[in-house]
Image (cartoon, grey):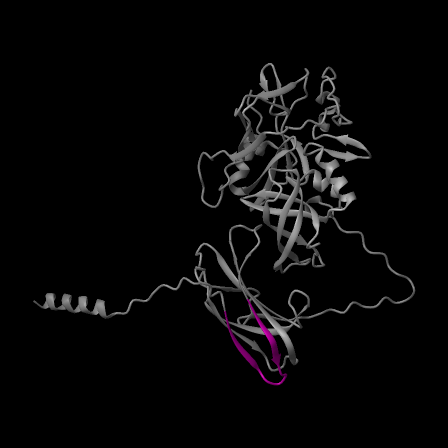
């Protein structure tokens, strides 16, 4: 009887206890504190931003979740100023527990996009980054404001002006990049002209030099390379690491280069399309991807194979540029042909280690038309398609033939595909030479090319997992 009474009481109490709903919004409540010893501030703008980022993907920029601006902010020296704020309260916006979040706070003398920062907020606990919401971080924060330090450069003494120092090479033997519009356009997956409608500023990376990000709103006009169409409306991301904030010719027709990887498109060059720029673009896109031009001479990605790369018995191709080293003609894929690249599923999936597989990709070329299609860039002989002698991979700013390429002993011929026919091969990128493979975990981009066609794939390389697989792929067969 006593047990039944206790059970009944427990049931009644369970109904009396109020249900606590799990908080899933990204709202953060904060207090900005300007200490009494900070110099007076008048008529300024406080710019507060909430960002989301993936803790396991180092090369992906943080996403802006919300932004709040407090205008006409004032502070009087000698008295502490405390201001409450709230950020991240958006209908339908929920926390992603796999992601992490942080808040930034800067004070500007005017418009945050046009004036420099005068003050910045740091967490009251003294940490560099104000992390919030997930991974045990708080939803309520206190940001303590201090002035941004500016270092005055000393004035030169005497009439002599010291020359600028020569830029030091980057780690790994890299040299500072030299601007070369022809090379950039020649290696681009997409090249087109478009009217630039808007250039929306995004978050600025806190590095030196800073990383400026923008969203560009474009209407495509003429397509020089890629599967875009005139009239397409695009919103694509642009990122630039430089000292000065980039400017864009909004309202003008521009030449744009872009690449597409992991489902999103990124802009490269954005130049106002004058006659000189357009002529450079036409010259660059008339060559297959991976080719270069030096002193009016053309060089193909097969130049390292020397004169034996292309047989002298092969008939010339009317109107085609010729590699000055190998004699190989510049061959394009032609209209009506498409290219597809997908990862080969790994033998064993390992969480956080091989989301993009183990270095192998299936490459498929398809005739999308209802008629036979001749594909000059895809070579064949009596034994079949010469994939290794046709494909090129752009990686780390260098064009390379696919692993396994050999000099051609006999004259090849063009491959002819039947209506709607597809042909495929598998390429193992781990067999590529002179690639700087990351230590730890990081991404490497491969741009697979056939003539003017290309597909870019971003590969996540985890050294502890992939190093043994790559070493095995390059091991010499036992006799």
Where in the figure is residue 258, as x and y percent of width and height?
A: 64, 44
Place of residue 105 in the rendered image (x, y in percent of width and height, measured from the top left): 58, 68
Asked if the magenta segment contains residue 73, the reply would be: yes
Q: Quadrant of residue 453?
A: top right
Q: Is residue 436 left or right of residue 460?
A: right
Left or right, residue 282 beside residue 350: right
> Could you tell me which quadrant the C terminus lies in?
top right
| Residue in the image at 62% along x and 48% along y | 219
| Residue under the image location 48 percent in, 46 percent down | 352
The dominant secondary structure in magenta is strand
Give whichever of 399, 155 is nearer the camera.
Answer: 399
Q: Extreme front residue here?
A: 231
| Residue at the left extreme of this rendering | 1
**Which residue is the extreme one toward the right?**
159
Task: Write the residue at 71% across / 69% down.
Answer: 150
Give the magenta-colored segment's residue range. 68-86
Q: Quadrant of residue 8?
A: bottom left
Q: Position of residue 367 (x, y in %)?
A: 56, 27
Closer to us: 182 or 474: 182
Task: Report whether residue 79 is seen.
Answer: yes
Q: Is residue 440 visible?
A: no
Q: Quadrant of the N terminus?
A: bottom left
Residue 136 in percent (x, y) is at 44, 63
């Amino acid at each position: 009887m006593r047990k039944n009474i206790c059970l009944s009481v427990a049931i009644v109490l369970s109904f009396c206890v109020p249900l606590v709903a799990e908080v899933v919004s990204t709202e953060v409540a904060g207090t900005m504190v300007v200490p009494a010893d900070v110099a007076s501030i008048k008529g300024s703008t406080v710019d507060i931003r909430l960002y989301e980022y993936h803790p396991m993907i180092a090369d992906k920029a943080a996403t802006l979740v919300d932004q709040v601006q407090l205008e006409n902010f004032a502070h009087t020296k000698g008295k502490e100023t405390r201001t409450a704020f709230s950020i991240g309260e958006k209908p339908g916006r929920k926390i992603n527990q796999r992601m992490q979040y942080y808040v930034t706070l800067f004070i500007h003398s005017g418009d945050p996009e046009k004036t420099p920062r005068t003050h910045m907020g740091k967490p009251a606990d003294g940490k560099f980054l104000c992390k919030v919401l997930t991974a045990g971080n708080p939803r309520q924060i206190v940001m303590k404001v201090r002035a941004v330090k500016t270092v005055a450069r000393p004035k030169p003494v005497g009439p002599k002006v010291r020359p600028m120092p020569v830029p030091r090479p980057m780690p790994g033997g890299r040299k500072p990049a030299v601007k070369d519009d022809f090379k950039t356009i020649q290696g681009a997956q997409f090249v087109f002209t478009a009217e630039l409608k808007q250039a929306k500023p995004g978050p600025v990376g806190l590095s030196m030099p800073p990383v400026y990000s923008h969203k560009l709103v474009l209407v495509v006009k003429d397509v020089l390379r890629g599967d875009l169409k005139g009239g397409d409306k695009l919103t694509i991301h642009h990122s630039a690491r430089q000292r000065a904030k980039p400017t864009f010719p909004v309202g003008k027709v521009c030449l744009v280069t872009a690449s597409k990887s992991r489902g999103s498109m990124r802009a490269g060059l954005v130049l106002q399309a004058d006659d000189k720029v357009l002529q450079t673009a036409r010259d660059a896109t008339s060559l297959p991807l991976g080719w270069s031009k030096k002193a009016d001479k053309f060089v193909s990605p097969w130049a390292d194979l020397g004169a034996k790369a292309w047989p002298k018995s092969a008939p010339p191709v009317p109107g085609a540029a010729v590699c000055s080293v190998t004699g190989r003609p510049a061959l394009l894929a032609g209209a009506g042909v498409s290219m597809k690249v997908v990862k080969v599923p790994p033998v064993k999936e390992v969480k956080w280690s091989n989301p993009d597989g183990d270095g192998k990709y299936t490459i498929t070329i398809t005739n999308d038309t209802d008629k036979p299609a001749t594909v000059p860039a895809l070579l064949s002989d009596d034994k079949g398609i010469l994939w290794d002698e046709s494909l090129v991979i752009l990686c780390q700013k260098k064009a390379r033939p696919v692993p396994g390429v050999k000099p051609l002993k006999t004259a090849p011929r063009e491959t002819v595909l039947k209506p709607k026919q597809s042909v495929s091969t598998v390429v193992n990128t781990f067999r590529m030479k002179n690639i700087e493979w990351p230590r730890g975990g990081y991404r490497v981009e491969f741009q697979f090319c056939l003539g003017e066609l290309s597909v870019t794939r971003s590969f996540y390389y985890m050294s502890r997992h992939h190093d043994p697989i790559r070493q095995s792929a390059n091991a010499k067969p036992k006799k």
